[in-house]
Image (cartoon, rainbow, N blue to C red):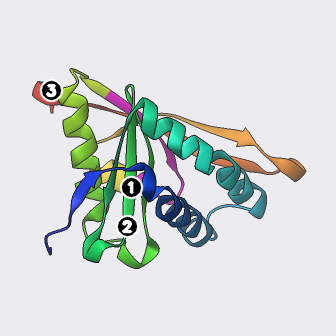
Amino acid sequence: MEDIPLRRFLPGDIEDVSRLVVETIEVSYAKSYPREAIDYFLEYHTVEQILLDATRGCTFVLAPGGRIAGTGTLLGTTIKRVFVHPSRQRRGYGALLMHALESEAIRRGIGRVDLSASLPSKRFYDLLGYATECEDYIPVRNGKRLDYYTMVKALGEGR
């Protein structure tokens, strides 16, 4: 894998990160979720929420060639908003982001992290050693639902 610049999120990154999140949701979730669930995801990952989480937690971006292709956030013990652009998936970018987020958690003295995994991302987290704690769903418009998994992983010595 080429050297991929991984760095902390800067406020000036917001437009590129927001665009990355929207494009990834639209493409990667289309085969797994109804339109109503995709709209729910889009409403959840607003510019304001991305900025708030970055301010309250630790957000990383991957920027090969100077263009943001991946992002992920650690907020307390929760890893969230891990997205890699569809054109860059299956190249190790997601694993690189997760390693950085887990390392940051360890640095902060966190021994166990949790996350909510979408249907298309569950296998990725399984491969990284996350355990499914429960399956759940969020009711969305028109009687549809957004299915997801709550997953956890012990960090540090227990790994």
**Where residue 8 sits: x, y (%)?**
29, 48
Mark toward the start of the polypeptide (3 vs 1):
1
Point out the residue furthest to the front here.
Answer: 12
Residue drawn where x is 15% and y is 33% of the image: 159
Q: Is residue 151 visible?
A: no
**Where residue 73 sits: x, y (%)?**
39, 43
The magenta segment: 113-122
Q: Secondary structure at mark 1?
A: strand
Q: Are marks 2 and 1 in contact (CB under 8 Å)?
A: yes
Seen in the image, is 134 located left or right of residue 140? left
Residue drawn where x is 25% and y is 31% of the image: 105
Residue indicated by mark 1: 71
Q: Which of pointers 3 and 1 indicates the residue nearer the eye?
A: 1
* Secondary structure mostly taken by the magenta-highlighted segment of the chain: strand
Estimate how packed mark 1 is, as few (under 14), some (14 to 19) or many (20 or more) residues with alpha carbons within 10 Å.
Answer: many
**Where residue 120 sits: x, y (%)?**
50, 60
Estimate how packed mark 2 is, as few (under 14), some (14 to 19) or many (20 or more) residues with alpha carbons within 10 Å.
Answer: some
Mark toward the start of the polypeptide (3 vs 2):
2
Seen in the image, is 58 located left or right of residue 56? left
Q: Label 2 sits on what residue type?
A: Ile
Would you place residue 22 above or below residue 55 in this image? below
